[in-house]
């Protein structure tokens, strides 16, 4: 079971006001969720074919990236907030090895 499966309902349709109940994760074998995992989960849980799922995942991240590039903040309730920032250079030093 992938982490995304906790977030996705096991069916396509929802009734207005329905909130999907998260599935409890008993064990997580994999520590990294990949794009391929997202595509596979959409395929299994929602029934999208893999091409449809790939298009959905690509479009989702494209929309987020476009918003960030325009300087907008992306807020995904229950998941996190994202914004681009600038980071200064770290001043490097010369390492001296002692014998």
Image (spheres, helix red, strand yellow):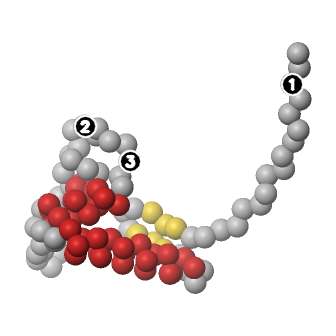
**Sequence-wise, which precedes: disc 1 or disc 2?**
2
Seen in the picture, residue 81 relative to 66 is either above or below; the reply is: above
Q: Position of residue 96 (x, y in %)?
A: 89, 29
**Residue beneath label 3, please?**
32
Residue 99 in view:
yes
The residue sitting at 32% across, 42% down in the picture is 30
Label 1 vs label 2, nearer the camera = 1
Tell me, yes or no, whether the two marked residues, 3 and 1, touch with CB atoms within 8 Å: no
The residue sitting at 84% across, 50% down in the picture is 91
Drawn side of residue 53 relative to residue 15, left or right: right
Q: Residues within 10 Å of mark 2 (few under 14, many from 20)?
A: few
Tell me, yes or no, whether the two marked residues, 3 and 2, touch with CB atoms within 8 Å: no
**Sequence-wise, which precedes: disc 3 or disc 1?**
3
Seen in the picture, residue 61 relative to 98 is either above or below; the reply is: below
**Residue beneath label 1, please?**
97
Tell me, yes or no, whether the two marked residues, 1 and 2, touch with CB atoms within 8 Å: no
Secondary structure state at the residue bearing disc 2: loop
Q: Position of residue 18 (x, y in %)?
A: 15, 71
Q: Residues within 10 Å of mark 1 (few under 14, many from 20)?
A: few
Please state which of residues 79 and 90 is positioned toward the viewer in this rendering. Answer: 90
**Residue beneath label 2, please?**
27
């Amino acid at each position: 079971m992938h982490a995304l499966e906790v977030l996705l309902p096991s069916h396509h349709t929802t009734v207005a006001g329905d909130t999907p109940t998260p599935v409890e994760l008993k064990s997580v074998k994999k520590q990294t969720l990949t794009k391929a995992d997202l595509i596979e989960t959409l395929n299994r849980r929602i029934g999208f074919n893999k091409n449809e799922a790939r298009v959905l995942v690509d479009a989702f991240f494209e929309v987020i990236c476009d918003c960030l590039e325009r300087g907008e903040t992306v807020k995904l309730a229950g998941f996190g907030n994202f914004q681009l920032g600038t980071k200064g250079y770290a001043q490097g030093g010369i390492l001296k090895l002692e014998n």
